Image (cartoon, rainbow, N blue to C red):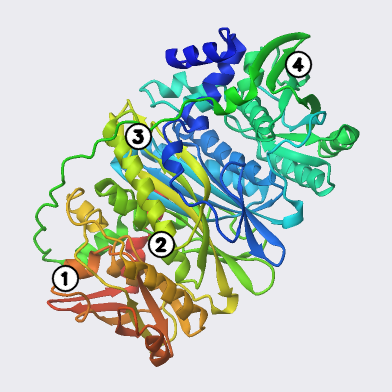
Amino acid sequence: MLPENDLKIITEEMGREPNLVEQGCFLNLWSEHCSYRSSAPLLKTFTTVGDRVIIGPGDDAAIIRFGEGWVLAIGMESHNHPSYVDPYNGSATGVGGIVRDIISMGARPIALMDPLYFGPLDTPKNLYLFEHIIEGIAGYGNCIGVPVVRGETYFDESYSGNPLVNVVCVGLAREENIVTACAQKAGNKLVLIGSTTGRDGLGGASFASRDLSEEAEAEDRPSIQIGDPFTEKLAIEATLEAIGAGYVLSCRDLGAAGLAGASSEMASKGKLGMRLEADKVILREDGMTPYEIMIAESQERILMEVEPENVDAVLAIGKKYDLHASMIGELTERLYYTVEFEGEMVADIPVMLLTEGAPTFERPSTAPPERDIGEKPDLPADLKKVVLDILSSHNIASKEWIYRQYDHEVQVRTVEKPGSDAAVLRIGDGKGLAMSCGCNPRHTLLDPYEGGKGTLIENSMNLAVKGAEGIALVDCLNFGNPERPDIYWQFKQAILGLGDAARSLSIPVVGGNVSLYNESGEYGTAIAPTPSIGLIGITGELETVPQSHFTGEGNTIILVGNTLDEMGGSEYYNMVGLRLNGNVPKVTDDSVKVIEKLINVVRDGNVVSAHDVSAGGLVVALSEMCDSMGADIDLSTVGDNLRADDILFSESHARAILVTSSPEKVTEMLSDVSHTVIGSVGGNNLSIKGEGFDISLSLEEISDARTSLTKLMME
């Protein structure tokens, strides 16, 4: 049902009350998921342009100039509510949808990243969701031949009842082959190609714009799309062939709001109208009504604008790939969105009213009372046990059980595999594409503004330790119910923080997605604010990209950046029951300086291995570098009047560990940023000492702790 105020606006604008089919179109296209009603004013604060940006927000995907005639297509989406109701199909179709966004721009998908957020795995329900969501991502990505090269998996009680499945896809194309979703000319025909249309996914966009109820699994299953990766693979090849042949003038994936969304938005972008014949859509179920045909979100479908003389050629391509294809309408000069069914007009809507008429507004926002950071905990008597407990916590432990299910080497571009700070792919000659994703929701929960800023700093550090400079980001802004003033305040502050960090690093925000109403009636919870991002960058020469593990007996280990008493939102505080305590890590001008300096130092070629310091703190980063070799570490000069737990577990931003055989040259290059030599590589233990503590961890102890997630899932 349309909200009463929306119905009133539409009736006044159209001069009559909309019929059932028209109401279905408005219900979905005016939903928060499609129209960004309460988020558009905030998203306009982002800087979206830059020297490399060819197409920014507003199309199926952004287009970024890489170099030598190559461009990158990048997009990010969520499939949160569907993945709770049907974890396998929800996550699989999340992958399928973002892949089609990339191919609709004329780019071949070359990589996926999947930031995922779950409730703790100590309950059967969360364990079930976790296992089947991973299975859905792997099953779909592997079948279509697109590698999953990077991800994040984060666990927090706030995601019980509402897991988050975010997906980033990057594609590669020659600049001259790019098409857009902007319709070109009245009289051109519309060809729908791909799978048939069924009743799956009915009202998916409106479903994504409300909270999950306790009965969601049963009541909302008709809103879940069913994916077919084998048809998707054929759709990839058919679409790229038709575009490559020059037959396609504009193109749109059928995603949120189905045919109604894709076709009306294509027309409005070109300032044109459209006439559709709904009975020309090839169906998989008998008796479907025009309402169902228009808003069904059946997967693996692409809409193409084709000149009349090329329609038969495009239909032939569909037949070649054993896909269903039909001409379903045409573009018109009359600026109305018209739908006919069996000779009768079932919808006739001013197209701009449908696509751009939803009222946008900022909601009331209220900051919470100033937070008391609380008392520091007593210093643990057994620091070694605490270190091992943190290494075995599921947020810190190795995610090998997850990523070994993904084919991350298909297409043979992958240089840096999952498990490293950032993925690196080979593009053209010499340089590479670096990719990172995710955020720290607990930081954002405690301070949305600083958490938003820290999200980009952390991802930029992941790229910097590979010698890569960020060139563009996309976001997936996951929050609770924006009608609550405290939630809308979180949302607004996180956007402002992310935007300020992006400007400080000169990285444009080129697209993304807003996912609101992430609350659970079953658990009575709202998710922690989760402004997850996908960041892409360009490396120096690939031979200068460092490893992530200790290497070279006797090599010098250098810590870059400042370690401060910033334990708020840390894994350590969460483990000891202080989830809301402590000072959140702050982003400073020095943070940007460290990132810029690291990129130059790594590209110079004298760093053999490097690792960002983030979740879990310095001791976790050092432990993660212990693969086949240990190190002797002295932290007595790290920090200023800090306790042992601050030094070991603080999650202060903009810190990295560098390993080099040329310490004089590297330290000289680091002369204008904080850095200190903290040890050397060698041995079969990680020995860490400092003021008042001395810890020794064997490689076996570290490995045993870090495999806790794998051992749980193999039981």
Q: Earlier in the sequence, mark 1 or mark 3?
A: 3
State yes or no: discs 2 and 3 in contact (Cβ < 8 Å).
no
- Identity of the amino acid at label 3? Gly
For the residues labelled 3 and 4, the Cα–Cα distance comes to 39 Å
- Point out residue 278 in the picture as x, y percentages from the top left corner: 73, 18
Q: Earlier in the sequence, mark 1 or mark 2?
A: 2
Which disc number belongs to residue 644?
1
For the residues labelled 4 and 2, the Cα–Cα distance comes to 52 Å
Residue at numbered disc 2: 504
Please name which of the two marks, 1 or 4, marks the residue nearer to the observer: 4
Q: Earlier in the sequence, mark 1 or mark 4?
A: 4
State yes or no: discs 4 and 2 in contact (Cβ < 8 Å).
no
Please name which of the two marks, 2 or 3, marks the residue nearer to the observer: 2
Residue placed at 66% from the left, 26% from the top?
259
Residue at numbered disc 4: 279
* 683 left or right of 8 in image: left
Please name which of the two marks, 1 or 3, marks the residue nearer to the observer: 3
For the residues labelled 1 and 2, the Cα–Cα distance comes to 33 Å
**Res. 627 visible in picture:** no
When the figure is inspected, residue 235 is found, relative to residue 455, above or below; the finding is above
- Identity of the amino acid at label 4? Asp
Residue placed at 52% from the left, 31% from the top?
34
Query: Is residue 683 or residue 352 the one in the foreground?
Result: 352
- Point out residue 644 in the picture as x, y percentages from the top left corner: 16, 70
- Identity of the amino acid at label 1? Ala
* 359 left or right of 303 in image: left
- For disc 4, the neighbor class at 10 Å (few under 14, some 14 to 19, many from 20) is some
- Point out residue 216 in the picture as x, y percentages from the top left corner: 42, 23
Please name which of the two marks, 4 or 2, marks the residue nearer to the observer: 2
Residue at numbered disc 3: 480
